[in-house]
Amino acid sequence: MEFLNFVLILWAGWLVWRRPERERLAFGVLVAACLLMVFLFLVGTRGSLVPGVNL
């Protein structure tokens, strides 16, 4: 899932760099990547039985 996030961020950057007229789509992709990051963080912290430490 982190790789998907990385790809979304790179795609948004490529859209702004190569196709500036698609800036609105790039912003939407970036927002989607941020929401995915928040979702992954919440799943990772709420779903764990042990706190995030090295055992």
Image: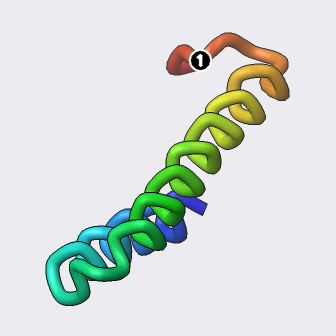
- Colouring scheme applied when the structure was drawn: rainbow
Residue 35 appears at what percent x and percent y? 62, 44
Where residue 42 sits, quadrant-wise, is top right
Q: Is residue 40 above or below residue 50?
A: below
Residue 53 appears at what percent x and percent y? 54, 15
* Residue farthest front in this picture: 21
Front residue of 23/1: it is 23
Q: Tell me if 20 is positioned left or right of 52 in this view.
A: left
Front residue of 22/30: it is 22
Q: Secondary structure at mark 1?
A: loop
Q: Tell me if 2 is positioned left or right of 27 in this view.
A: right
Q: Tell me if 31 is positioned left or right of 7 in this view.
A: right
Count of number-bearing discs: 1
| Residue at x 67%, y 11% (from the top left corner) | 51
Quarter of the image for the C terminus: give it.
Answer: top right
| Residue at x 25%, y 70% (from the top left corner) | 13
* Residue farthest bottom in this picture: 18
Label 1 crowding class (10 Å Cα cut-off): few <14, some 14-19, many 20+? few
Determine which residue is flagged by label 1: 52
Q: Amino acid at mark 1?
A: Gly
Where residue 23 sits, quadrant-wise, is bottom left
Front residue of 55/42: it is 42
| Residue at x 70%, y 39% (from the top left corner) | 39
Q: Is residue 29 above or below residue 32?
A: below
Q: Is residue 29 above or below residue 47?
A: below
Where residue 49 sits, quadrant-wise, is top right
Residue 48 appears at what percent x and percent y? 79, 24
Quarter of the image for the N terminus: give it.
Answer: bottom right
Q: Is residue 12 above or below residue 44?
A: below
